[in-house]
Amino acid sequence: MHNQKESNYNSLTENNLHKALGLFINYYNQTQPLLQSIADYYSQTQFSKTSCNHMPPVLSSSQHLDNCIEVPDYMPCTKGEQNMTYKINRKIIINGKKTWIRANSEQEYAEKLVNGIADNHTSDIKHSFKDYALNWFEVYAKPNIATVTAVTYQRQLSLYLIPAFEDLNIEDITVDDVQQLFNSMDTAKATKDKVRIVLNQILNAAVEDEFISRNPIKSNRLKITGKESKATSTYTLEQMKYLIQHIDDIKQPQDKVYLALQALHPLRLEELLGLQWADIDLDHMALHICRAVTHPTRNQPEIKAPKTKSSMRVIGLSAFAAKYLIPSNSTDFVIGGAKPLSFTQVRRMCNRIQKDIGFDERITPIRFRTTILTDLYNQTKDIKLTQAAAGHTTSAMTLKHYVKGRESVLDTAATVETIYTT
């Protein structure tokens, strides 16, 4: 009987061992502790008292690796194993976690090692937050979102999330860790919300992968507070009148076109830069908004669809602005020509305009849109009209961010008095 077992053991040839090692290396090419344990076994294995006395041949390919695993003359037994005897009882360390692999044959040992578990299921492989987050970004986020959004996500990862959690495994992040991150951020609440959005998606993915059972972001204990973002201010009526009256003082024709369109229409900068001559209907005095030009990396322009479906709209063209328009090739951009302006070119254009007309403040594109929508609502008191002109999905967005109001609270007394005394 003993000779038969010995014969079976010797049937595992050196060729088979080579194949097994190749399989191990391919499967665990990024799990160094596991590779180390494999190499150590085939180079300097010491069998426990219950092991077979026949040593398998040593592989020369692993002779340069250090043997760092000690195999004592005894091993711990878990419940239910006190009466079981294994030929192979071997300790390995994976990610700093000691575990035992028990088997009755080299083939059984190899299968358990390849699967990364011992028969008592004590293996506990964890996942670096940094590696997991970057993989999520490259595979799931970046290919499926707009470039400008991808740049925003990447900024949250590099500035906040990876520095905070790069030394932690995804499985070890707690509600306390997340709260400490937000407590340490001396930023506006809007910035914290951007970080929360990215972290929430990463941790949701970890829940789906069954690395964690619950997303810490969803804890009721978590509190995210911060400074309010500075609201975009409007230009005064006097400033707007000054800008319009001095368009002719601008030296470059393209700069004149820009200010005439930006100061008299509720356009996002990206929508204005996306206008081509085919989008301007001088016969019907209309502007067709059907594309946008953004600068996600604050450098070269990127042509894309407008921000939302509601952003694709037709608005009226100012007759005052129309006199500065000299149509060119239908596919040329109104501002830029054959190619839309870069971020640097837009900034230089705004600086030139300020200098040419002697304006006392910076020429800031977003302030024009806020100013025009504010005055449009003040004149019409029609929020749905103002919403449509803005290209917003909801009127709540228009009211919250773009309708600032021109009246002072001190004027309310006179208004109430007029209502009740006349």
Image (cartoon, rainbow, N blue to C red):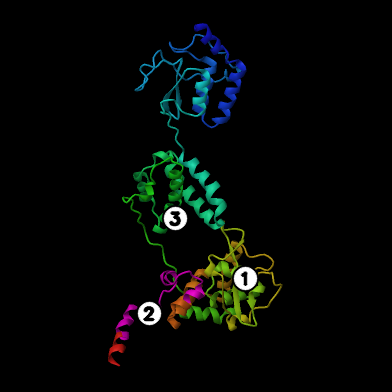
Q: Earlier in the sequence, mark 1 or mark 2?
A: 1
Q: Quadrant of residue 305?
A: bottom right
Read off the residue under disc 1. Answer: 275
Residue at image x 36%, y 44%? Answer: 177
Residue at image x 41%, y 41%? Answer: 212
Read off the residue under disc 2. Answer: 407
Residue 306 position within the rendered picture, expressed as x and y whole percent measured from the top left: 56, 66
Read off the residue under disc 3. Answer: 194
Q: Which of marks 1 and 2 is in front?
A: 1
Name the secondary structure under disc 3.
helix
Q: Which of marks 3 and 2 is in front?
A: 3
Estimate the spatial distance between the alpha carbons at disc 1 and disc 3, rounded to whole Å.
30 Å
Estimate the spatial distance between the alpha carbons at disc 1 and disc 2, rounded to whole Å.
34 Å
The residue segment tinted magenta is 386-415
> In front here: 185 or 308?
308
Residue at image x 62%, y 59%? Answer: 300
Tags 3 and 2 touching, CB below 8 Å: no
Kind of residue at badge 3? Lys
Q: Quadrant of residue 421?
A: bottom left
Kind of residue at badge 1? Leu
User: Magenta region's main secondary structure?
Assistant: helix
Name the secondary structure under disc 2.
loop
Q: Is residue 282 placed above or below 178 in the rendered structure?
A: below
Kind of residue at badge 2? Glu
**Pointer 3: residues within 10 angstroms few (<14), some, or many (20+)?**
some
Q: Earlier in the sequence, mark 1 or mark 3?
A: 3
Residue 67 position within the rendered picture, expressed as x and y whole percent measured from the top left: 50, 18
**Pointer 1: residues within 10 angstroms few (<14), some, or many (20+)?**
many
Estimate the spatial distance between the alpha carbons at disc 3 and disc 2, rounded to whole Å.
33 Å
